[in-house]
Amino acid sequence: MCNGWVCFPVRFNLIAEVGPEPHRSLDQSELTERLPRVRSIMAEPDYMDGDCDELIKPKKLINPVKTSRNHQDLHRELLMNQKRGLAPQNKPELQKVMEKRKRDQVLKAQKEEQEAHKKQSDLEIELMKRQQKLEQLELEQQKNEEEQENTPEFVKMKSNLRRTKQEVDEQERTT
C-alpha cells in the first residue's frame, strides 16, 4: 500500500517530438520540464514517486479467441473477401432462421387452404349445387322482370285479362 491507498503502477512514456533521436524516451530533467503541461491535462497519481516498488506490475492479458487458429483463419478469409468485394450477408444467422421459419409457415398455410378447397365433403358439394340453382333462378326472375318492364302496357293488360278470364273459367267449372 502506498500512503494508505492500493497502488497500481502506471508508466508514462513521453516521446520527444524534436531532436536527433525522435523516438527516444525523455530523461528525468526533460520530464520535469514537460510535467507542468502534463499536469494540466490530467492529475498526477500518488504512486509516481517510485516508493511502491513491491507492487505487481500489470501485464496485458492474452485473448484466447484471437490467438486461436480458427479465429485467425476466419479473419484472414473475411479480409480477403472484403478486398474482392464479396461481403458476407448482413443478416445475422438468427434472423435468417426466423425468416425461413416464417416463409415455411406461410407456404404451409397456403397448402392447407388449397387442400381444404380440394377436399369438400358430400354435404358441401350438395350445398354448392343448391346455391348455384338458387342463383340461376334469381337470374331468370330478374330477366323476366326486365322483359316485363320493357314490354308495352297494352301487352301487359292483355296478359292480365287472359289470366283473369282463365281463373274465372276454372271457378265456373269447379262450381
Image (tube, rainbow, N blue to C red):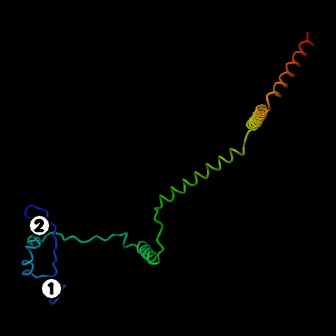
Q: Position of residue 160 (x, y in %)?
A: 83, 23
What count of labels does the image hold? 2
- Residue drawn where x is 47% and y is 78% of the image: 84
Label 2, residues with CA under 10 Å away: few <14, some 14-19, many ≥20: few
Instruction: Residue 114: give x, y in percent of width and height.
Output: 67, 48
81 lies left or right of 153: left
Is 56 situated above or below 115?
below
Along the viewing direction, whichever of 77 and 154 lies nearer the viewer: 154
> Mark 1 highlights which residue?
18
Residue 16: where, in percent of width, then height? 15, 82
Q: Position of residue 29 (x, y in %)?
A: 6, 81
Mark 1 secondary-structure assignment: loop
Q: Is residue 78 left or right of residue 108?
A: left
Q: Is 155 drawn above or below residue 4 in the view shown?
A: above
Name the residue tied to disc 2: 43
- Residue 36 image-quadrant placement: bottom left
